């Protein structure tokens, strides 16, 4: 039988019984929630304040990489005249900062052209062969531990028409330990200075 409560709600006797039981259980549930919350708080507090564990052992050290070359390739420039007065040869002292060994490589380049619109210098490796009406003319070089020689050679008698003045020469010293990963013959085949730098994989800087 349905009855109307003082508040105006309608409910059955079974619903009323359930509501009374819920009202009685509320204090117990509140206590249980508070107890659970307190346990969790204590656990978190103990966990955060615990002592830090010991540091683990250091891992094994990696292998040592290969040592790089101690001396890098360097260059120096000079102007040379090849005339009848000096016998068509010119000597230039190698800078004292460059130590030349038997196993080192020495190359020479001559400034062949300059492109102003691109601000580009064109360096050509010696020897340079020229064919003219008299025969074959060779612009070549050699070097010692202390100097470099630029000279002309030909299969005919040189004369004043074969003279060169103000040739801009660039000598390049490549240490032997730098060529360990590069074949010497391959380096000598480079036709231009930029080709040589590309083969070496480094920028060749002027000697100090």
Image (cartoon, rainbow, N blue to C red):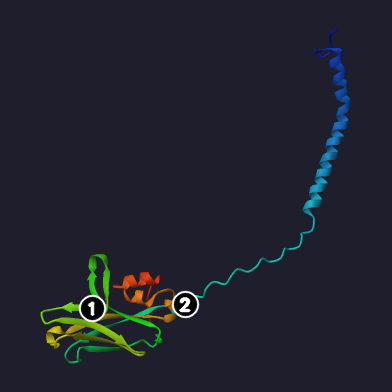
Which is in the foreground here, disc 2 or disc 1?
1
Which is more toward the observer, 78 or 142? 142
User: Which x, y percent locates residue 161?
Assistant: 12, 84
Mark 2 crowdedness (10 Å alpha carbons): few <14, some 14-19, many ≥20:
few
Q: Residue at x 52, y 73 (%)?
A: 66
Q: In this view, does 111 lie to the left or right of 26?
A: left
Q: How far apart are marks 2 and 1 (CA)?
A: 31 Å
Query: What residue sits right under mark 2 in the picture?
Result: 69
Q: Is residue 144 above or below residue 131?
A: below
The residue nearer to you, when weighing 131 against 97, is 131
Q: Is residue 6 above or below residue 50?
A: above
Up/down of 81 relative to 27, above or below: below
Residue 154 left/right relative to 194: left
Marks 1 and 2: in contact by CB < 8 Å?
Answer: no
Image quadrant containing the N terminus: top right
In which quadrant of the rendered view does residue 183 lie?
Answer: bottom left
Instruction: List x then y, in percent, for residue 166.
Output: 21, 82
N-term-proximal mark, 2 vs 1: 2
Instruction: Please say if 3 is above or below 59.
Output: above
For image coordinates 83% across by 42% down, the residue present is: 38
Q: Residue 125's quadrant in the figure?
A: bottom left
Q: Which residue lies furthest to the left in this view?
A: 133
Disc on res. 128: 1
Q: In which quarter of the image is residue 160?
A: bottom left
Instruction: Say which of 39 and 55 sits in front.
Output: 55
Residue at 27% from the left image edge and 80% from the top image edge: 169
For image coordinates 36% across by 72% down, the residue present is 197
């Amino acid at each position: 039988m349905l009855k109307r409560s003082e508040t105006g709600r309608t409910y059955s006797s079974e619903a009323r019984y359930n509501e009374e039981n819920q009202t009685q259980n509320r204090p117990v549930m509140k206590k249980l929630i508070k107890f659970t919350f307190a346990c969790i708080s204590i656990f978190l507090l103990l966990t955060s304040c615990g002592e830090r564990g010991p540091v683990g052992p250091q891992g094994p050290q990696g292998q040592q990489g290969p040592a790089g070359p101690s001396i890098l390739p360097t260059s120096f420039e000079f102007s040379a005249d090849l005339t009848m007065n000096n016998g068509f040869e010119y000597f230039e002292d190698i800078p004292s900062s460059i130590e030349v060994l038997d196993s080192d490589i020495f190359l020479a380049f001559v400034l062949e052209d300059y492109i102003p619109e691109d601000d580009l210098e064109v360096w050509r490796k010696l020897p340079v062969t020229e064919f003219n009406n008299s025969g074959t003319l060779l612009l070549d070089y050699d070097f010692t531990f202390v100097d470099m020689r630029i000279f002309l050679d030909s299969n005919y008698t040189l004369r004043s028409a074969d003279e060169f003045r103000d040739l801009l020469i660039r000598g390049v010293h490549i240490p032997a330990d730098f060529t360990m990963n590069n074949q010497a013959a391959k380096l000598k085949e480079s036709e231009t200075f930029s080709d040589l730098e590309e083969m070496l994989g480094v920028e060749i800087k002027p000697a100090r």
